[in-house]
């Protein structure tokens, strides 16, 4: 059985943070959304991996990288577009290496796209036996 409560809470925090940042935008709100994006992405790929292994009989040897996880998840229709999820993950990693204003703005924009995709993922995961 896959427990989704932690991902549901993270997605809700990201949604609320995004809504607040959209109406009261400043660096502090943007940075908070980026942090919420980072940990929500981490929860999402870990749950995807677990679901693939437990519910879709994917072999662990087939999931050596995050790209493998996203491609397998798309293959079994857990997500719509593996390349978009790979872009989300790459954006997630950008702010962990170094920080600058332009990069933070780009990651914030990617977090908006990710929110839609991770909400859809939750809907799909609720239907997985």
Image (cartoon, rainbow, N blue to C red):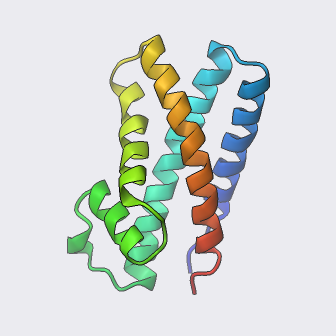
Side of 120 where 95 appears, left or right: left
**Looking at the image, is 119 positioned above or below residue 102?**
below
Give the residue displayed 41% in from the left and 78% down from the top. 76
**Which one is in front, 89 or 2?**
89
Asked which quadrant contains residue 52, the reply is bottom left
Quarter of the image with the N terminus in it? bottom right
Side of 123 where 94 appears, left or right: left
**Which one is in front, 107 or 56?**
107
**Looking at the image, is 37 positioned above or below residue 105?**
below
How far across and down, in percent of the image, does residue 2 sit?
56, 75
Quarter of the image with the C terminus in it? bottom right
How far across and down, in percent of the image, does residue 6 sit?
63, 57
Number of marks in the rendered image:
0
Give the residue displayed 43% in from the left and 71% down from the top. 50
Asked which quadrant contains residue 33, the reply is top right
Give the residue displayed 57% in from the left and 64% down from the top. 121
Give the residue displayed 58% in from the left and 22% down from the top. 31
**Which one is in front, 92 or 86?**
86
**Looking at the image, is 97 positioned above or below residue 128?**
above
Side of 105 where 53 appears, left or right: left
How far across and down, in percent of the image, does residue 62 sit?
23, 72
């Amino acid at each position: 059985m896959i427990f989704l409560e932690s991902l549901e809470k993270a997605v809700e925090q990201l949604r609320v943070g995004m809504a607040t940042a959209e109406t009261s935008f400043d660096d502090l709100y943007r940075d908070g959304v980026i942090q919420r994006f980072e940990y929500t992405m981490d929860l999402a790929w870990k749950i995807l991996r677990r679901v693939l292994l437990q519910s879709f009989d994917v072999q662990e040897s087939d999931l050596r990288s995050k790209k493998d996880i996203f491609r397998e998840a798309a293959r079994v229709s857990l997500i719509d577009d593996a390349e978009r999820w790979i872009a989300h993950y790459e954006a997630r990693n950008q702010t962990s290496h170094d920080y600058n204003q332009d990069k933070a703005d780009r990651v914030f924009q990617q977090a908006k796209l990710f929110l839609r995709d991770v909400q859809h993922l939750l809907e799909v995961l609720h239907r997985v036996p």
